[in-house]
Image (cartoon, rainbow, N blue to C red):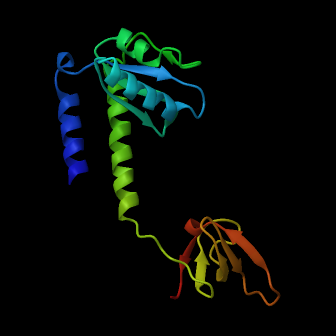
Amino acid sequence: MDKENEVKKFTEASGSPERDRKPIFIVSVPKNRAIDALILIKQRAQILNLPIYSAIIIDKHPDLIYVEADDYSAVAQAIAYFRYARAFETPLDALEFDELRRSIEDAIKHSREVEEKKEIEFKVGQIVRIIHGPFKDRTARIVSVSKTKLFLDLMVGATLIIEVKPEDVEPVSE
């Protein structure tokens, strides 16, 4: 329910006239450093009392941070001395803003779907059907289970053990 309310508020805010929403600036950061920069932006906004209202990273663009702020100088101050980080001076225009809004809505929908999926626990000896990969539609018996992979015996007469990801199989029997 909370996420749905957030989406509605966000959608209503984005549907409002251009003058009501704050500009959104893009900050480009080095690969795999976006979380560090996001934390820095948050801390500097609090400490320096900068007019920065939100900052997000989207899976679609993991090396970009979208910062909602009153002006470019606040964003520049927030990322100052962060090596190779660059803030673009012009904020997003209306088309880019709509694309960002759709990306955020898609991310929220996806997170709801992930929450709804039940975690399937696999056990040694369980029979499963392979749903992805070269052995698709074959049944196999689980020989070993780890956090990120399963080892399966294809039961073809001779022992043939393969390694698959848990999301690549579905249980046939329990």
**Which image quarter: residue 133?**
bottom right
Q: Number of callouts in the render?
A: 0
Q: Is residue 80 left or right of residue 17?
A: right
Measuring from the top left, give residue 122's x and y in whole percent: 55, 78
Q: Position of residue 62 (x, y in %)?
A: 52, 35
Q: Is residue 28 above or below residue 99?
A: above
Q: Is residue 143 visible?
A: yes
Residue 63 in view (yes/no): no
Left or right: 153, with 81 as reference point = right
Of all residues, the one furthest to the bottom in this rendering is 157
Pick the front one: 134 or 169: 169
Residue farthest to the right, as pictured = 158
Question: Which quadrant: the N terminus?
Answer: bottom left
Image location of residue 50, percent across then percent down:
31, 17
- In the picture shown, does residue 131 fall above or below 3? below
User: Which image quadrant for residue 51?
Assistant: top left
Q: Residue at x 38, y 38 (%)?
A: 103
Q: For the point 32% across and 11% down, which residue is it? A: 71
Residue 105 vertical position relative to residue 50 in the rendered view, above or below: below
Residue at position x 37%, y 11% in the image:
72
The location of residue 77, given as percent across then percent down, is 41, 13
Is 154 in front, or is 86? 86
Of residues 34 and 1, the one drawn nearer to the viewer in this rendering? 34
